[in-house]
């Protein structure tokens, strides 16, 4: 079963890949030989019509549960960027994910928030979705979003 079929089975669909919000590009495909490339995906946040769906620090302004939902939505945006750049069926492996959580000073569960994104990638891509990862707490993120997610994906080139 392909990744798009798995998404449908999970009751999910890919959003339109978000446009860059500043002076960068959403993805960069870097050939590495043998018909493969590294696809770098810029930080993804959960927006609706260009506006953050939620803003604030975790857990005092955004609940842990809402932060996890944000992480899942960021992962869907990451998949949308991958699909637009190379097609989900070309994914050999998600090499690395970097997740940032805008956190209150005493919050230490960033890894559990980013688990929501990691779990979604694994559910959709199977073993190809298992990855190395960083989960970082920070005092601020763009647009005051609670979660931002970026990654590096190995893809087959046509």
Image: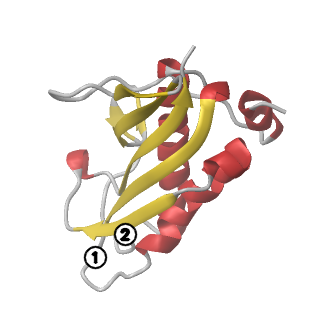
Instruction: Say whether disc 1 or disc 2 marks the residue closer to the N-terminus.
Output: 2
Determine which of the numbered discs, if any, sits on residue 142 in the image: none
Which residue is drawn at the image coordinates 23% and 45% (left, top)?
143
* Position of residue 124 in the picture relative to residue 138 (left or right): right
* Position of residue 12 in the picture relative to residue 53 (left or right): right
User: Residue 83: image x %, image y %?
Assistant: 55, 24
User: Residue 119: image x %, image y %?
Assistant: 64, 58
Residue 92: quadrant of the picture: top right
- Inter-mark Cα distance, 1 to 2: 6 Å
**Pointer 1 and pointer 2: residues touching (CB < 8 Å)?**
yes
Q: Secondary structure at mark 2?
A: loop
Which residue is drawn at the image coordinates 31% and 51% (left, top)?
145
Pick whichever, 121 or 96, lies toward us. Answer: 96
Which residue is drawn at the image coordinates 33% and 28% (left, top)?
26
Question: In this rendering, is residue 93 above or below 56?
Answer: above
User: Residue 111: image x %, image y %?
Assistant: 46, 72
User: Residue 150: image x %, image y %?
Assistant: 38, 46
* Position of residue 38 in the picture relative to residue 14 (left or right): left
Which residue is drawn at the image coordinates 44% and 53% (left, top)?
97
Q: Secondary structure at mark 1?
A: loop
Determine which of the numbered discs, if any, sits on residue 104 in the image: 1
Q: Which residue is mark 2?
A: 58
Q: Residues within 10 Å of mark 1 (few under 14, many from 20)?
A: some
Quadrant location of the C terminus in the rendered image = top right
The single residue placed furthest to the top in the displayed view is: 158
Pick whichever, 93 or 83, lies toward us. Answer: 93
């Amino acid at each position: 079963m392909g990744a798009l079929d798995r998404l449908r089975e999970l009751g999910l669909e890919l959003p339109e890949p978000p446009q860059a919000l500043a002076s960068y590009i959403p993805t960069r495909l870097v050939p590495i030989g043998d018909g493969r490339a590294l696809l770098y995906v810029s930080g993804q946040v959960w927006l609706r019509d260009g506006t953050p769906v939620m803003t604030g620090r975790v857990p005092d302004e955004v609940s842990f549960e809402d932060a996890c939902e944000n992480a899942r939505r960021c992962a869907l945006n990451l998949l949308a960027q991958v699909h637009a750049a190379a097609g989900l069926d070309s994914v050999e492996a998600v090499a690395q994910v970097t997740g940032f959580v805008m956190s209150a000073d005493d919050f230490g569960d960033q890894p559990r928030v980013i688990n929501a994104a990691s779990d979604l990638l694994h559910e959709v891509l199977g073993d190809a979705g298992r990855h190395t990862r960083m989960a970082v707490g920070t005092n601020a993120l763009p647009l005051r979003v609670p979660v931002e997610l970026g990654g590096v994906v190995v893809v087959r080139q046509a």
